[in-house]
Amino acid sequence: MRKIYILFFIPLLFCFSQKTKSAEPVKSGFDFASRQLKVALTGIEAAKKTTAANKVMPRTLNKDGGIQMVSIGDWISGFFPGELWYMYEYTHDESWKIQAEKFTEKLESLQFFTGDHDIGFRMYCSYGNGYRLTGNEKYKEILLQSAKSLVKRYNPQTGLIRSWDSNKDKWQYPVIIDNMMNLELLFWASKVSGDPSYYNVAVSHADKTIENHFRENGSSYHVVDYDTITGKVRSKCTAQGYADESAWARGQAWGAYGYTLCYRETKNPDYLKKAEEIISFIFSNPHLPKDLIPYWDYDAPGIPDEPHDVSAATITASALYELALYNPNKAKQYRKWADTILESLSKNYRATAGGDGGFILLHSTGHKLANSEVDVPIVYADYYYLEALLRKQQLSGKR
Ligand code: GLY
């Protein structure tokens, strides 16, 4: 009898400990994030007293340790509301929802903004998560208008959405790899409105980017400039990487995430192949550290004495958890890499509890060559960290 009892309980205990083990980083990550984001909310109130009234979103830490606030026009303005939505999604606590709504609704006027491609980032991370979690009809209308604004930047001659209007002396029609992320808003808009034109623009952009943005080794250029008359490539270069021919770490992460979401929405195997090629470039790169948190550029000349980019790691981890759903042969490996990233982050890259302006993770790099935001906490690293934790939880089916 005793033997049977033990035989019954050993597998049960094993099962329980496995589930607890896989849930632990998620719980610990969200507990820490909850404490930090409360600090951030207080810090934002304090910062408002000393900054211009239009600076309403936290971006990073200033050198003096204060929160750097930016206006809604900044490309990062959707990430803080998005973090608050992820807190609500994990905790189901109404107080996070109230804060998420408050910060999301500051962006309402951006639905008509056509000045750059980042409208997808701004609106889908904020209103997109809000609509997904609440079904608020007003959010749906705002998102549809945002998609209309984004497609105004599409030119059938190039078959792409134009990223930036800046540097007109240098570029005619610059498209950056980051732009892949904005396609998610368009896929969503087609499904919700029934209008295939958004889908067609997204697919055209993804196809043209496959054609022109990638190198033989799987890495991508940051910027590809097109001729607006012929639609042909004029030049390939970088804006934030170390060199035109180098592999800027965050750019590789945007590409991997972007093609993963394109595969989810279309089931086109070319997109899955592209996402996996980028992942293979990243994880076979000799300059990727053992803890899987990359330096800011895979070809940065001073490695290992170069700053890391935690944001590249969190974007990649989130992409990997989704990619694991699409290739059963590689799922285990993809999840293992993503798990290692999350473990490394919680062990060695966390902000000071109760400090650092309430940011969650340190050691991201925004724009190294411009000496801007080097080795700092940054809001988009935290956003994709929370998203990765949620995706991990969904994969394990257990909080
Ligand atoms: N999309 C701008 C950046 O990644 O810095």
Image (spheres, helix red, strand yellow):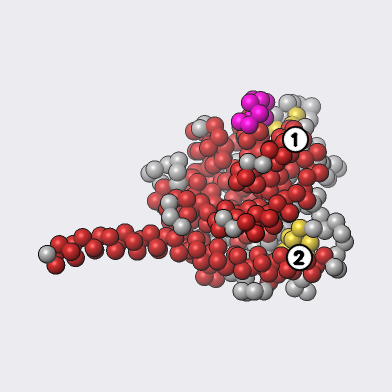
Can the viewer see residue 301? no
**As drawn, 306 above or below 94:** below
In this orientation, which residue lies closer to the viewer: 282 or 30?
A: 30
Residue type for callout 1: Gln
Crowd class of label 1 (few under 14; some 14 to 19; many from 20; radius 10 Å): some
In this orientation, which residue lies closer to the viewer: 8 or 388?
A: 8
Q: Residue at x 57, y 68 (%)?
A: 32
Judge left or right: residue 324 versus residue 108.
left
In this orientation, which residue lies closer to the viewer: 113 or 19?
A: 19
User: Magenta segment, which residues?
Assistant: 190-198
**As drawn, 211 above or below 253:** above
Crowd class of label 2 (few under 14; some 14 to 19; many from 20; radius 10 Å): many
To which residue does mark 1 refer?
A: 145
Determine if the magenta segment contains residue 394.
no
Tell me: is circle 1 under 8 Å from ligand 1: no
Give the spatial CA distance, label 1 vs label 2: 29 Å
In this orientation, which residue lies closer to the viewer: 97 or 7?
A: 97
Q: Residue at x 67, y 74 (%)?
A: 355
Q: Main secondary structure of the magenta part?
A: helix
Residue 153: x %, y % from top left: 77, 34
Residue 276: x %, y % from top left: 49, 43
To which residue does mark 2 refer?
A: 44
Judge left or right: residue 91 versus residue 73.
left
Residue 282: x %, y % from top left: 53, 52
Residue type for callout 2: Ile
Q: Residue at x 57, y 60 (%)?
A: 294
Q: Secondary structure at mark 2?
A: helix
Determine if the magenta segment contains residue 197.
yes
**As drawn, 321 above or below 225:** below
Q: Secondary structure at mark 1?
A: helix
